[in-house]
Amino acid sequence: MLENGQDSLILRFGLGQAHLKQKDFPAAIEHLLKALEFDNEYSAAFKLLGKAYSLSDQNQLAIDTYDKGIQIAENKGDIQAAKEMKVFLKRLTT
């Protein structure tokens, strides 16, 4: 789809998710960052991006991503995403 010029938030999020499952963290990070270019308040992308950073031992980037994602999720009323990111953030900082 990308080769045909059909780029979108959902496509990039799905590709990021698929690469994360395959443990291809650099590709997952690349696609999730692109997803956030489409919507920089998409809390689900922040959650997966933080996870990708964490699993690739980029803990400070994971912490920063979760912090920002939590703030965005809470501002949007996305309570479940905020709660999940708070749990992941706590695991990184304790």
Image (tube, grey):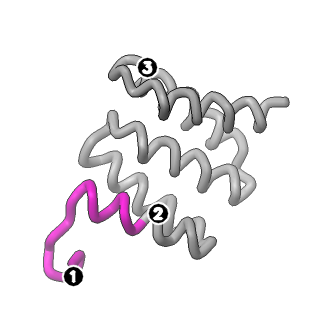
Furthest toward the front, the residue is 80
* Dot 1 or dot 3, earlier in sequence: 1
Q: Amino acid at mark 3?
A: Glu
Q: Amino acid at mark 2?
A: Gln
Mark 1: which secondary structure? loop
Quadrant containing the N terminus is: bottom left
Q: Is residue 6 above or below residue 64?
A: below
Q: Which residue is mark 2?
A: 17
Residue 74 numbered mark, or none: 3
Between marks 2 and 3, how big is the CA–CA gap? Answer: 22 Å
Instruction: Residue at 85% x, 30% y: name it.
Output: 94
In the picture provided, is 60 more to the left or to the right than 24? Answer: right
Residues at marks 2 and 3 touching, judged by CB atoms closer than 8 Å? no
* Dot 2 or dot 3, earlier in sequence: 2
Between marks 1 and 3, how big is the CA–CA gap? Answer: 36 Å
In the picture provided, is 45 more to the left or to the right than 83? Answer: left
Q: Which residue is mark 1?
A: 3
Q: Nearer the viewer, residue 71 or 57?
A: 71
* Mark 2 or 1, closer to the camera: 2
Instruction: Residue at 58% x, 34% y: name it.
Output: 85
Instruction: Residue at 14% x, 74% y: name it.
Output: 5
Magenta-highlighted residues? 1-15
